Image (cartoon, grey):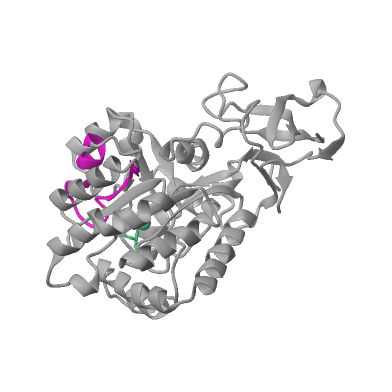
Amino acid sequence: MTTTALTRLTQLVTNDPSLGEGPLGLIQDAAVVIDGDRIAWVGPSSKAPATDNAVDASGRSALPGFVDSHSHLVFGGDRTQEFNARMSGRAYEAGGIRTTVAATRAATDEQLSANVAHYLAEALRQGTTTFETKSGYGLTVEDEARALRIAGEHTDEVTYLGAHIVSPDYADDPAGYVDLVTGPMLDACAPHARWIDVFCEKGAFDGDQARAILTAGKRRGLLPRIHANQLSYGPGVQLGVELDAASADHCTHLTDADVDALANSATVATLLPGAEFSTRATWPDARRLLDAGATVALSTDCNPGSSFTSSMPFCIALAVRDMRMTPDEAVWAATAGGAQALRRTDVGRITPGARADLTLLDAPSHVHLAYRPGVPLVSGVWRKGVRVA
Ligand code: NIG
Ligand code: FE
């Protein structure tokens, strides 16, 4: 197998405190050796073993590829008009999802798959090497199963979100829709997904419905995650903790009891600042969660309605500027935090044995991701040991 080294990195984020300084395991003047699809060696450049190839990375820094643990990429159409109206003062409503449901149902498999590939390629160029994506714009048995099949062509982290909103076809019978989501739709979707998710929110699914949906998914072997407390206070976060969800996502409106529940659980609080940016909503208070001891992840929530960004660097900059995270905390949350939100130990860190996913920055330190917002600093991306950008 071919070995490649990145040498003379001004700084390396390993996320392995046993390898370097602080929680990010920082090493100055560092080298990383990749053997096949794995990290083989990490340490000071002066001690790096000989390799087949070497990339001189002086003046640059590297960090684990970003882990974007929350996106909605299987969709048709776009919602430019809705965004325009919102920026002229209209409020964001969960009902906008119906527009995308109609466009997604009308799209061919090929169009949907090409769309996913397009946004994944965009994300990859910006340093994202692991991505989760969801169904949720089909809302029929066939359209949800199709969305998951297509998602599975592009990533292993596939989430069944038949419970995104009550399907327009069941507008007068929400209980009937929950029966569908937990019955025939689950039967058709479970073989194609790893995760089950529900949008627990006023206008979507209440706490009892969300519990029924996640519990049914768990019985079928799917692992739970939840859209919780995005637009208002509600039962989502505590339900997620009760059901041992890997992650409660959004966490914008939290009571002290919600913060405590997260801090005393294995459920990660995944914050999605692109959504608050694009809907001009209240920022989640990352500082309050971190100070209480909760584990925080950052993701894009990339979707055509509430957060049409695929950029993890943009989310890091927002989290630092507007959610009171330090640059170190934000970088950890976008890498190791995302990995934890997907219950993965092979990604999100640069340590011997981990998957060789690295993002190289044309900047001397990871702090520049927040310090230089909007600047395309990513100058190289390796995924499973292969240079892809
Ligand atoms: O995570 N909250 C629910 N789902 C998406 C929004 C999807 C849409 O507006 O199309 C979200 O923000
Ligand atoms: Fe979402």
Which residue is drawn at the image coordinates 43% and 52% (left, top)? 192
Q: Is residue 283 above or below residue 257?
A: below
Residue 300 at x, y percent in the picture: 45, 54
Residue drawn at 76 percent across, 40 percent down: 59
Camera sees residue 365: no
Q: Quick one: quadrant of the N terminus?
A: top right
The stretch in magenta equals 222-242
> Is residue 250 found left or right of 375 in the rendered image?
left
In the rendered view of the protein, which quadrant contains the C terminus? bottom right
Instruction: Identify which residue, 215 or 301, lies in the foreground.
Output: 215
**Residue 179 lies in what quarter of the image?**
bottom left
Left or right: 284 with respect to 28?
A: left
Q: Is residue 167 visible?
A: yes
Write down which quadrant ligand 2 falls in.
bottom left
Q: Image point 66% across, 51% down: which residue?
A: 378
Residue 387 image point, x, y percent: 73, 48
Q: How many marks are shown on the rendered structure?
A: 0
| The magenta stretch spans residue 141 | no
Q: From the top left corner, tell me how far across and down residue 121 is, in percent.
A: 61, 60
The answer to whether residue 138 is left or right of residue 259 is right
